[in-house]
Image: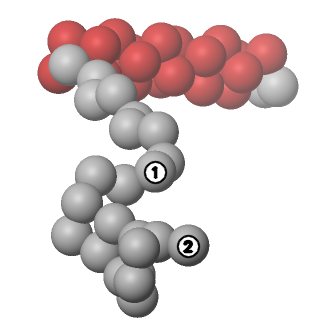
Amino acid sequence: MNGGQNAVRWFGVPDHARIPAVSPAGRHGFLLSLGALAAVNLRRHR
């Protein structure tokens, strides 16, 4: 039991894992690599 409490961690720390944030440089690098892959794919299928 929860010692008479109705809700576990109602305002406390959540049980789920936290998702790490990506830095702006990492985001830009990902977008640049995604664009490069798209460009290569477009050239390959023409």
- Res. 38 mark: none
Q: Is residue 16 left or right of residue 10?
A: right
Please give the residue where the numbered disc 1 appears in the rendered image: 15
Q: Quadrant of residue 14?
A: bottom left
Query: Does any portion of residue 7 appear in the rendered image?
Result: yes
Disc 2 residue type?
Met
Q: Residue 13 in the image: x percent, y percent?
A: 28, 52
Q: Residue 34 in the image: x percent, y percent?
A: 51, 22
Q: Is residue 9 left or right of residue 34?
A: left
Do callouts 2 and 1 mark residues in contact (Cβ within 8 Å)?
Answer: no
Q: Is residue 25 left or right of residue 29?
A: left
Please give the residue where the numbered disc 2 appears in the rendered image: 1
Relative to 11, say whether 43 is above or below: above
Looking at this view, name the residue that lies furthest to the front: 3
- Classify the position of the C terminus by image quarter: top right
Disc 1 residue type?
Asp
Crowd tier of the residue under label 1, counting other residues whose Cα lies within 10 Å: few below 14, some 14–19, many 20 or above: few
Residues under labels 2 and 1: Cα distance? 18 Å
- Classify the position of the N terminus by image quarter: bottom right
For label 1, the SS is loop
Q: Residue 35 in the image: x percent, y percent?
A: 47, 23
First in sequence: mark 2 vs mark 1: 2
Could you tell me which residue is drawn at 82 percent across and 25 percent down? 45
